[in-house]
Image (spheres, rainbow, N blue to C red):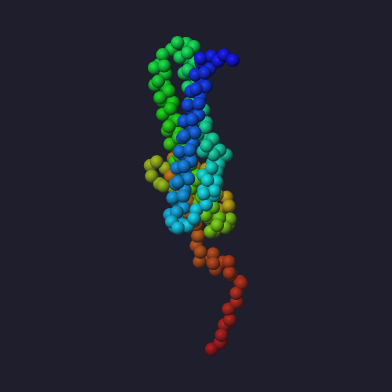
Amino acid sequence: MKVSREKLLKQQLDLIVKDSALDIHDEIENKLVDREVERQAHILGEHVKIDDTEVKAVVNSNFKGVNWSTRLCQDMAVVQKEVEKTTSNVLLRGRHPNEYVAKFKKQTNTTTYNASRLLVTESACVQAESQKLTYLKDLGEDGEYKYVAKIDKKTSKICHSLNGKVFKVKDMMPGVNAPPMHPWCRSTTVTHVGNWRDRFFTERKGKYQTENKES
């Protein structure tokens, strides 16, 4: 079967793009896993065995219905489409490749930026999911956590509005009431115990009787 030069070239370029995407995928996954293992080691101690399976499950969890791997594929699909378009213009229309260098560089720089943003955002998402697991173990579903935003001139409106608010652990969901709320989100969460003294006496009110001893 005869294959046209254009089709053959597109197939070769497609393999190059997919191979690059696979390298980026592995690099991002490794960095996410390494960051989470390092974070847990600081919390649990260096000599505590960390479950790699649990870490990878957290790393590959969904954020707003899509995991980081799918987002990366979407970005690389844009690059692949641009490569195919450039190839067709060069071969079929006789245009010089240099005409497309600036545009393609801009596109690939955008993809590089997106990959960087993806790594930062998904790291925050992994941390939030890991925090939820810790909160569930330590506080239970009815435990509470507080949203803490980094307040400065760069703070987003949504993080400003959530700062200091308290939520139930069972309702914790990244992108809804837990970081990351948006790309490059710098917010975090902390456990919330409230006024434990008031809660302690309120829960025990009426359960015990005291005896008045007459002297």
Q: Residue 15 or 99: which is nearer the viewer?
A: 15
Coordinates of residue 109 in the picture (x, y in percent): 41, 29
Coordinates of residue 193 in the picture (x, y in percent): 50, 60
Q: Which residue is drawn at 39% across and 17% down?
A: 98
Quarter of the image where one finds residue 90: top left
Coordinates of residue 203 in the picture (x, y in percent): 58, 66
Coordinates of residue 204 in the picture (x, y in percent): 58, 69
Q: Which residue is drawn at 48% across and 45% down?
A: 33
The answer to whether residue 199 is above or below residue 190 is below
Placement of the N terminus among the 4 image quadrants: top right
Instruction: Give left or right: position of 115 versus 215.
Output: left
The answer to whether residue 158 is above or below residue 104 is below
Residue at the bottom extreme? 215
Residue at the front extreme? 1
Could you tell me if residue 124 is visible in this image?
no
Q: Which residue is drawn at 46% across and 50% down?
A: 37
Q: Residue 204 or 120: which is nearer the viewer?
A: 120
Could you tell me if residue 122 is visible in this image?
yes
Quarter of the image where one finds residue 110: top left
The answer to whether residue 33 is above or below residue 46 is above
Residue at the right extreme? 207
The number of callouts visible is: 0
